[in-house]
Image (spheres, rainbow, N blue to C red):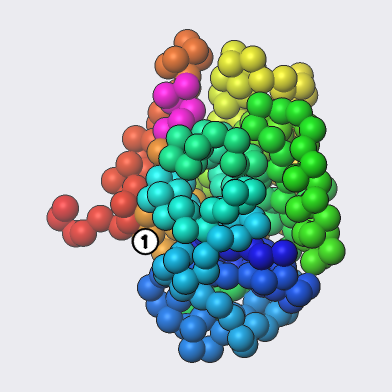
Amino acid sequence: MKIAVMGAGGMGGWLGAKLAVAGNEVGFIARGAHLKAMRTSGLTVSGAESLRLSDIAATDKPDDIGPVDVVLFCVKLYDTESAASALVPLLGPKTFVVTVQNGVESADRIGQIIGNGKTLAGAAYFPANIAAPGEITYVGRIQGKPHIAFGEPGNGPSERAHEFAGICRAAGIDTDVFDDTESMIWEKFCLIAGTSAATALTRQTVGMVRSDPDMRWMLSEAIAEAARIGRKLGIALHDEVESQTLAFIDNNPPNGKSSQLIDLERGRRLELEGLSGVVIRLGRQTGVPTPVHCTVYAALKPFVDGTPAPGG
């Protein structure tokens, strides 16, 4: 299968490397120092798994790759529109996009640019980061979850989703396909919105947040605010999603950090608008109060474009 990875950071880099090692034709779309390193030295994955791709197709120009069967869409939320606009050279008559971004609006935002019916909504459940240009650290899968999951927006069965899931599984990527994609996306959103808010605001690991009663309360409320909004919007979230999300967090390694905390520590842009910002906006639309996410948003707003300059 011919696959393009739009955004070859930690998540896209690991997924693309696994698919390439399994014999698929994979093109990586990246930029900056990371792209330069991949072109000159290949791509290295270390951590819970070691991989090495010495001969790699990496570019910042999708035209160099041309039409593909599948695009894995792995860019940060704030790059969604610009990256979606760049997809055109990759799209053939049957090409579809699988987005595994954070948030609950990714598939809609991509569809507004490339047209409806071309995007599968998905989620990823493994931590991976760029350790250095051309080097990915893969921490391992999150206990009790697949590596990735996806399905048709609006729900329903999908032959193309199952076909691509088979390709992923053959590459050693644990993959689930959902008919009720909306519930899956919102359950992941409760998890990521909660952990991103609590760990980034406190600058603490998941273990520290969950073990302190005051920080745990904030984490719990951040999860609950997102869940209340989802239910108000008609998403079929089960009654125990809040408690099960907390239990899931309790059963994973204590040294875990949300990607938002890692970006904050490294002075990078934050996905704040697509996480707490979306909770606040949808809360206002549905009449659901969101005091925790409002506080998180206000406190992190100065860092949304990266570490502010001194005196700025």
Magenta stretch in the rendered image:
276-282
Q: Residue at x 51, y 81 (%)?
A: 38
| Magenta-drawn stretch contains 280 | yes
Closer to the camera in the image, 198 or 36: 36
Q: Is residue 79 visible?
A: no
Type of amino acid under label 1: Gly
| Magenta-drawn stretch contains 310 | no
Q: Residue at x 45, y 35 (%)?
A: 112
Local SS, label 1: loop
Residue 188: quadrant of the picture: top right
Q: Is residue 199 above or below residue 182?
A: below
Instruction: Give x and y (percent) for residue 120.
Output: 64, 41
Instruction: Give x and y (percent) for residue 257.
Output: 58, 55
Give the quarter of the figure containing the N terminus.
bottom right
Instruction: Give x and y (percent) for residue 161.
Output: 75, 45
Report the residue that reaches farthest toward the front: 93
Residue 239 is left or right of residue 269, and the answer is: right
Q: Residue at x 83, y 55 (%)?
A: 166
Q: Which residue is mark 1?
A: 267
Residue 15 is left or right of residue 290, and the answer is: right
Q: Residue at x 52, y 65 (%)?
A: 66
Most prominent secondary structure in the magenta stretch?
A: helix
Residue 298: quadrant of the picture: top left
Q: Is residue 185 visible?
A: yes
* Number of numbered markers: 1
Report the residue that reaches farthest toward the left: 311
Residue 311: quadrant of the picture: bottom left
Instruction: Give x and y (percent) for residue 83.
Output: 43, 53
Q: Is residue 150 above or below residue 167?
A: above
The crowd level at tag 1 (other Cα within 10 Å; few <14, some 14-19, many 20+) is: some
